[in-house]
């Protein structure tokens, strides 16, 4: 199946999943001359979720694909992260991107805008996509790997298979631990008059058991206006009760915590406009057989705060393409490029998530004291900014392609 041209081996590669990691992987590998086929479980590929932050790390990957200018047209610059503990008035989140050496702000964007940009590039590249293909396993021998789909139809054989099918991939390794808190989310237009901080991810907390957040996402795909994602943290087991209580009760609770958010929340007409997202944490393996590699949540997943899940998937895609082109061997190169960065951010997520989403009072008390009194020290604010930007411990970003 491999084709040798101009001294390079072009491989036949299957990619499972049309999320950011899968689409970016397809673009990188196709541009290297490989024969790439995308498989998607839905009848029509579509994005899942509301807004996310494309951190400077993810922006570098999109720039290497030549897509960053288009993304900027659809997104909104986010210059800082800001949060207040309403019970004591202290800062619980305080970070400005200008405090990092790169001084590049994040981009708030609707997931549909990121998806559409990547998908358009995939279509322009002529990369085939097969839909209604739900992966259930693989069949592998010494010379090839074959995806096995739920429809039972035989698939082609490939030299490599890239699993970008998400946290619930049947091929993922490691135990998926359900996180205690998820979030309701929706997308609304930014009102003409409001008291929420502009160009910022702004949040309000009641200790760590309640969180309300608002973030600009650039173009709202539903209206064409400038939009914002709104979030409300909630335990998954409470979601049904919140839905049953109705939109008036939801608005009341949200605005009780954050009165200035009322012009945003007033736009939500019913609970049907809100979606509950449930999160999990797992760190598996980058490679689970000779010809099977993982990208994004099928390898590592955690709380997606600040959009790190999508950013990590983009970086994985870039690193995997570099590894495929390496003479050192794919497995060794891919692991060397990504393992430390992933393990570091998985650890940081385990450490920091309970500070912002938990039932306890001690951890948020420590959070408020530390952020309020120490986060503006130059060495501390620089460290925090590098963490949030996704560049701490990062060894690799591809150079821009022609």
Image: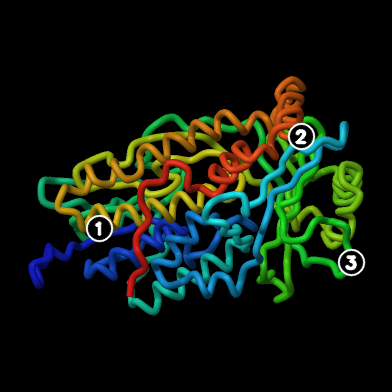
Label 3: element kind? loop
Judge the density around disc 2: few (<14), some (14-19), many (≥20) Cα neighbours within 10 Å: some
Q: Answer yes or no: do the residues labelled 1 and 2 have beta carbons within 8 Å? A: no
**Disc number at residue 24?**
none
Image quadrant of residue 84? top right
Q: What residue is shown at x 32% (from left), y 64% (from top)?
A: 28
Closer to us: mark 1 or mark 3? 3
Label 3, residues with CA under 10 Å away: few <14, some 14-19, many ≥20: few
Vertical placement of residue 155 versus 89, above or below:
below
Q: Going by the picture, which residue comes out furthest to the top?
A: 362
Disc 1, SS: loop
Q: Position of residue 8 (x, y in %)?
A: 12, 66
Q: Quadrant of residue 233?
A: top right
Of 140 and 70, nearer the camera is 70
Q: Answer whether residue 135 is visible to the viewer in this image.
A: no
Taking the image as shown, residue 355 lies to the left or right of residue 291, namely: right
**In the rendered image of this protein, does residue 56 appear above or below residue 204?**
below
Q: Nearer the viewer, residue 98 or 181?
A: 98
- The disc at residue 154 is 1
Residue name at image x 23 percent, y 53 percent = 146
Q: Which residue is labeled 2 in the image? A: 372
Where residue 317 sits in the image (x, y, percent)? 37, 55
Q: Nearer the viewer, mark 1 or mark 2?
A: 2
| Residue 238 at x, y percent in the picture | 74, 35
Q: Which residue is mark 3?
A: 193
Going from the N terminus, do you reach mark 1 or mark 2 first? 1
Task: Point out residue 240 in the picture as x, y percentages from the top left corner.
Answer: 75, 40
Label 1, label 3: how far apart the Cα atoms are: 57 Å
- Which comes sooner in the sequence, label 1 or label 3? 1
């Amino acid at each position: 199946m491999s084709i040798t041209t101009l001294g390079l081996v072009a491989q036949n590669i299957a990619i499972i999943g049309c999320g950011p990691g899968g689409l970016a992987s397809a673009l990188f590998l196709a541009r290297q001359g490989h024969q790439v086929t995308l498989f998607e479980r839905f009848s029509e590929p579509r994005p899942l979720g509301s807004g996310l932050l494309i951190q400077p790390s993810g922006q570098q990957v999109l720039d290497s694909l030549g897509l960053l200018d288009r993304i900027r047209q659809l997104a909104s610059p986010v210059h800082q992260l800001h949060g207040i503990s309403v019970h004591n008035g202290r800062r619980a989140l305080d970070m400005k991107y200008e405090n990092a050496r790169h001084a590049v702000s994040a981009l708030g964007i609707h997931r549909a805008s990121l998806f559409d940009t990547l998908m358009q590039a995939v279509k322009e590249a002529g990369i085939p996509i097969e839909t209604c293909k739900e992966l259930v396993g693989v069949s592998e021998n010494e010379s090839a790997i074959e995806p096995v789909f739920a429809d039972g139809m035989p698939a082609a054989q490939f030299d490599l298979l890239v699993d970008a099918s998400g946290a619930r991939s049947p091929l993922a390794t490691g135990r998926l631990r359900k996180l205690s808190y998820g979030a309701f989310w929706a997308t609304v237009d930014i009102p003409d008059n409001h008291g929420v901080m502009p160009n910022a991810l702004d949040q309000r907390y009641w200790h760590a058991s309640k969180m309300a957040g608002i973030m600009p996402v650039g173009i709202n795909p539903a209206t064409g206006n400038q939009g914002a994602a709104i979030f409300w943290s909630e335990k998954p087991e409470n979601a049904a009760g919140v839905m049953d209580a109705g939109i008036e009760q939801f608005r009341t609770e949200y605005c009780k915590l954050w009165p200035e958010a009322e012009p945003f929340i007033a736009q939500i007409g019913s609970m049907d406009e809100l979606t509950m997202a449930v999160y999990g944490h797992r760190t598996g393996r980058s490679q689970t057989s000779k010809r099977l590699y993982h990208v994004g949540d099928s390898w590592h997943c955690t709380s997606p705060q600040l959009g790190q899940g999508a950013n990590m998937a983009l970086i994985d895609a870039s690193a995997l393409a570099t590894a495929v082109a390496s003479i050192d061997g794919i497995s060794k190169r891919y692991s060397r490029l990504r393992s430390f960065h992933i393990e570091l951010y998985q650890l940081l997520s385990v450490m920091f998530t309970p500070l912002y989403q938990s039932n306890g009072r001690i951890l948020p008390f420590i959070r408020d004291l530390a952020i309020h009194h120490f986060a503006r020290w130059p060495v501390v604010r620089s460290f925090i900014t590098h963490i949030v930007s996704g560049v701490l411990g990062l060894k690799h970003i591809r150079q821009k392609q022609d």
